[in-house]
């Protein structure tokens, strides 16, 4: 079957830019693409079967996909496979990443409390310095990936917060540290957590302090199933051209709650090029700019995917 001509997509109005607050990720553009595809397919029903368009709230941080699944999404709307798309700065417009296996990491937050004994900064011998203890731990955490994991296993451990003290002349009693862990495999996640616990225990003992750690498991890894990934590669090649399909791109350590969908159903999550990403035009950046040229590309991809998945007999 011929790919959907991109010219046919020009009948859809462009997503307008407007000043004001933005999430800086392009979800409004993604929604517009899906609405455009639904409108087009409703007026051109040259396919056999049922298509479910999922407009999901709370993708960022709140895990809206998990809640929808818990509320019976796939019981009310049974599907054989699921497909997702996200714009991606750094990939040229008109190109698409579609590949099997992990494409985005699972994410887990951690919170560490270091408790020492507060004292006057001029008399440090009278206390147990939580700041020095916490600083040692920050440095030690940098060895979790480099000295605990197999060199071929990917992971990230980043400390993103370090809160301690209020006065210039007081060594505080407590330090609170927070950060994130990113992995692609459950067994790697487990190894990272056990390594962090060992370091907390050892450094606490060495300094005479108390250290506790809590892990907050969030999104699982986003893993594309092989058959659906190959199918999306075929669809992308027919819409954009064979040389515009990226089949062996490095996965991202960012996280995506479409992962919950892929744990329930086979499917594929693709990246649609948003442009070079220069000048800070990256995801979750104040300079991010959704490229309106993607709208017709996204609609064409979705419409052709439906036609290829559900060909008219």
Image (cartoon, rainbow, N blue to C red):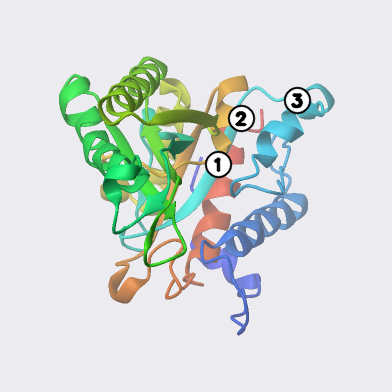
Q: Is residue 297 left or right of residue 77?
A: left
Q: Is residue 11 shown above or below 39?
A: below
Label 2, residues with CA under 10 Å away: few <14, some 14-19, many ≥20: many
Pointer 1 or 3: first along the chain? 3
SS at badge 1: strand
Q: Residue at x 51, y 72 (%)?
A: 292
Residue neighbourhood size for the residue with mark 1, other residues' Cα within 10 Å, grouped as few (<14), some (14–19), many (≥20): some
The residue shown at (35%, 42%) is: 127
* Residue drawn at 55 percent across, 22 percent down: 266
Contact between marks 1 and 2 (CB within 8 A): the answer is yes
What residue did someone put label 1 on? 84
How far apart marks 1 and 2 lie (CA) works out to 9 Å
Give the x, y percent position of residue 273.
38, 58
CA–CA distance in space, label 3 to label 2: 9 Å
Q: Is residue 263 above or below residue 172?
A: above
Mark 2 = which residue?
261
Count how many numbered circles sit on residues in the image. 3
* Nearer to us in this view, 83 or 148: 148
Q: Where in the figure is residue 257, as x and y percent of width and height?
A: 57, 38
In the drawing, what numbered circle is on residue 74?
A: 3
Q: Is residue 220 at least partly visible in the picture?
A: no
Q: Position of residue 114 (x, y in %)?
A: 42, 37
């Amino acid at each position: 079957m011929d790919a959907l001509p991109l010219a046919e997509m020009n009948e859809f109005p462009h997503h307008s830019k407007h000043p004001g607050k933005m999430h800086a990720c392009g979800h409004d553009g993604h929604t517009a693409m899906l609405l455009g595809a639904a409108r087009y397919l409703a007026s051109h029903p040259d396919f056999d079967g049922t298509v479910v368009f999922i407009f999901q709230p709370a993708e960022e941080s709140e895990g809206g996909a998990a809640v929808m699944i818990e509320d019976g999404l796939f019981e009310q709307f049974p599907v054989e496979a699921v497909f997702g798309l996200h714009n991606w700065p750094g990939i040229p417009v008109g190109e698409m990443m579609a590949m099997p296996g992990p494409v985005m990491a699972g994410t887990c937050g951690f919170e560490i409390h270091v408790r020492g004994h507060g004292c006057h900064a001029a008399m440090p011998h009278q206390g147990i310095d939580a700041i020095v203890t916490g600083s040692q731990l920050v440095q030690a955490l940098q060895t979790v990936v480099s000295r605990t994991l197999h060199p071929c296993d990917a992971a990230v451990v980043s400390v993103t917060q370090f809160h301690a003290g209020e006065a210039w002349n007081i060594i505080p009693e407590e330090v609170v540290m927070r950060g994130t862990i990113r992995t692609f495999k459950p067994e790697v996640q487990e190894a990272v957590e056990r390594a962090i616990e060992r370091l907390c225990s050892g450094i606490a003992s060495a300094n005479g302090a108390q250290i506790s750690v809590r892990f907050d498991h969030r999104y699982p890894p986003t893993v594309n199933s092989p058959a659906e990934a190959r199918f999306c590669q075929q669809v992308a090649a027919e819409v954009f051209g064979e040389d515009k399909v990226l089949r062996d791109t490095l996965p991202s350590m960012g996280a995506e709650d479409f992962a919950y969908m892929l744990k329930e159903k086979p499917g594929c999550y693709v990246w649609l090029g948003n442009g070079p990403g220069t000048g800070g035009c990256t995801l979750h950046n104040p300079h991010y700019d959704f490229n309106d040229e993607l709208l017709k590309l996204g609609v064409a991809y979705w419409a052709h995917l439906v036609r290829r998945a559900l060909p008219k007999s």
